[in-house]
Image: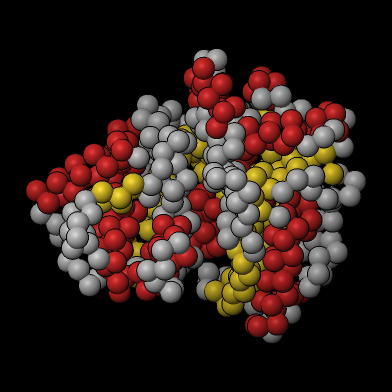
Amino acid sequence: MRYLLAIDQGTTSSRAFLVDQNLHLHGVAQQEFPQRFPQPGWVEHDPEAIWSSLCATISALFQQTGVDPRQIAGIGLTNQRETTVVWDRASGVPIHPAIVWQCRRTAPLCEALKRAGKEPLFQQRTGLLLDPYFSGTKITWLLDQVPGARTRARNGALAFGTIDSFLVWRLTGGQSHVTDVSNASRTLLMDLDTCAWSPELCDLLQVPMALLPTIVDSSAVVGTTRHVPGLPDGIPIAGMAGDQQAALFGECGFAPGDAKCTYGTGSFLMMNTGDRPVRSRERLLTTVAWRKNGRVTYALEGASFIAGAAVQWLRDGLGLVKHASEIETLARQVSSSGGVVFVPALAGLGAPHWRADARGVITGLTRGTTAAHLARATLEGIALQQCDLVTAMERDSGMSLTSLRVDGGAAANDLLLQIQADLLDRTIIRPQQIETTVIGAAALAGLAVGVWDSEEALAGHWKEDRRFQPMMETGERTEQIAAWRQAVAKA
């Protein structure tokens, strides 16, 4: 038996999985790491804590399963995408905590660039909007704020990477400074048509090109392990993709029009648009889904910054539940939210609104409102964000969604998925394996090292678990969406 080691480096934890040639999971290890909030709207990670958590999960995985690490045919890596790290090339030590994708500290720089009329240029070249979400302005901030960093960057002494780059650097003992094209497409620095770094955009953001990694395919051997605790040297690192692109690949979204929604810390709707980028008129993101054998597949994406994190807030901030999994039971105690609407803009509003200044709003509270009403309104808020995104995506693509595949931790919540089907008026399809981000990373690696020879071979292993059909009356759906839009205007 040959296995693939799939690494999922997420926003709150690092996870390691063993995946076999039938795409079955044979073990999982997970370790959380601290989140830092140095100022309101700022979010940071310690890159060393991320690396330590990854090493710990790899060791725990092999202890748990008893599998010999020499049976690993290749490593697939998926990651939180726009989170930004800059490190010293000689020592490998980061010069500053990682700036997380959720962090809003570069909002003033984004606004200044917009006032200077630069957003249309960035949107045309990169498919992205000027928002603190993306890596480019985070790099600018680091080079401006860390003493001596800009000079060292120009001299080639520093390296930038999203988390995929940083981990591959560590996994290869500093031999490979690379990023895959899906992660590169999230930086505000990559030309979407050429899939190469844009000198003009780098100049606008004052990012020296000597700082940047080499852009590689998502399915290709980019290096081998070297001096990694718990792993032999020489294992190919063969698959890399941002978490949402990996999820689309894991859902076998190989054809134009295929779409998925991942419910994690945030929620992310992504549609395969084929071999040409579709420029959004609805303020969605045009991005690279993956590149294999030099052939690029593009996608449209809508990102909502807060999904599962809203449930975590109910747990940690308000104490309504002790465990996130209890939210469904609490929400089922009522048949409706009783007129309560929750806009979960706890880190601003993402697509299609793109308002970094937005804040969470709860409307419709009465003396009769209970914890159960708020719990149900939270699930509805998570789902209503997708209604805005689907409407925009169908307008942009000219394609109608008849069904939507879903994954991520919150996809285990039956009530959330029924609410989603009702409010979208679409069939929601949940696979048997909702860890599709991990499956996608393993599949990209397996294709590169010959475990599978085609996407068709992978599709044969995808299995449906359950379908959720819309049951809501049209009038009720229209009323809820209208109340949502009124609440969003107040956020």
Q: Is residue 83 above or below residue 445?
A: above
Q: Residue at x 43, y 74 (%)?
A: 322
| Residue 233: image location, x then y, percent | 83, 65
User: Residue 73 lies in what quarter of the image?
Assistant: bottom right
Q: Is residue 28 left or right of residue 88?
A: left
Q: Is residue 143 above or below residue 413?
A: above
Image point 88% across, 30% down: which residue? 155
Give the x, y percent position of residue 226: 84, 61
The residue shown at (65%, 83%) is 64
Foreground pick, 449 / 155: 155
Quadrant (top left, top right, bottom left, bottom right) of the C terminus: top left
Q: Is residue 442 visible?
A: no
Q: Residue furthest top?
A: 116
**The N terminus is located in which quarter?**
bottom right
Residue 348 visible in the snapshot: yes
Does 63 sit above or below residue 394?
A: below
Q: Nearer the viewer, residue 146 or 194?
A: 146
- Residue most toward the front? 367
Query: What residue lies at 53% left-to-right and 63% top-to-bottom?
Result: 439
Q: Position of residue 256 (x, y in %)?
A: 39, 42
Q: Residue furthest right?
A: 90
Residue 200 horizontal side relative to residue 227, left or right: left
Depth order, front residue of 424/97: 97
